[in-house]
Image (cartoon, grey):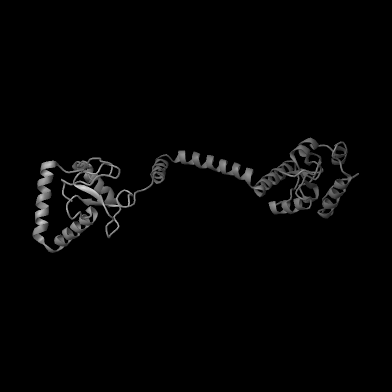
Amino acid sequence: MPAAYPLPLPGEPIPQQFKLGSLCLNNHEWDGMGQSLRYAKPKGACVICSRESALARQEQRRRTDPEFNAKQAAYAREKRKREGRPSRSKHGLPYTPQLDPQTRAMQKAIQSAGLLPSVAQLVNDQQQAHWQEHPSDRLVYVRERAKHRARWRFMTEPSYRLYHRAKSKARKVAQRGGTPTHLSPTHLWRHWSKFDHCCAYCGCSGDLEVEHVVPISKGGEHHLSNIVPACHRCNSNKGRKDALQWYRTRSYYSEARWLKIQSVLEQSRQTGRQLTLIP
């Protein structure tokens, strides 16, 4: 379309060189009016049809006529020299300025470097280099990490918690001259299942501790025939007291629970190793 005949935008007044006429054969409707935009000449051809036809003829000449392409290129060069290079940005922004040689060299180096390491990898590499120069710092880190992991496992893994509690009780028996029995978390877990994983005294569920019915301080053995699961409240309140005498003073005392404690401990009793629990 020649520059002297710019198309009006929808909703704007129609210039005098155009007019609205009947709908063309290609149904080029203008601004939803049911009519086509036509030239104000006697023939009154459709503007859109004429534009599409001109573009098609221009494309055909571009493919078949080298001289036409040369003329078009020369015209574009003259127009650019006269009016400057228009922006191709849809937001009207100017062209990106040419980079200096150093920046272009850096971009080329980055492109040729391939996949670059992540920030985490760079930090890890720097940390490893520091530890190679300062081995003592790595030792401190490893020890602190082991403490945190052990604490986390103790808080989240019941079997790990049972293992350390049983180990602590076995060490206490050995310090008093006794011979503790090795109890794995599996042994204690099966023993706990006989009490439905509830406190043997009050019947509440939750975090269960290793409770010795006959206290270690009074010669009680570290064996399943002397161990019941207990909540922290019952375990700490009983302490070194006699189990039956202490239990009868509790408001939650239950004869059925006490008989069950006797029955389960009797099943785990070893001949000649377990002290008498009930007078």
How many labels, in total? 0
Residue at 81% from the left image edge and 42% from the top image edge: 202
- Please tell me which residue lies in front, 216 or 107: 107
Extreme-front residue of the structure = 42
| Coordinates of residue 231 in the picture (x, y in percent) | 75, 41
Residue at 17% from the left image edge and 60% from the top image edge: 57
Q: Quadrant of residue 70?
A: bottom left
Determine if residue 272 is in view: no
Q: Is residue 232 left or right of residue 41?
A: right
| Coordinates of residue 52 in the picture (x, y in percent) | 22, 57
- Please tell me which residue lies in front, 108 or 249: 108
Task: Name the quarter where the C terminus is drawn.
Answer: top right
Extreme-bottom residue of the structure = 64
Determine if residue 265 is in view: yes
Q: Is residue 215 above or below residue 57?
A: above
- Please tell me which residue lies in front, 71 or 40: 40
| Coordinates of residue 182 in the picture (x, y in percent) | 71, 51
| Coordinates of residue 30 in the picture (x, y in percent) | 29, 50
Residue at 53% from the left image edge and 42% from the top image edge: 145
Q: Is residue 279 left or right of residue 241?
A: right
Q: Is residue 244 left or right of residue 196?
A: right
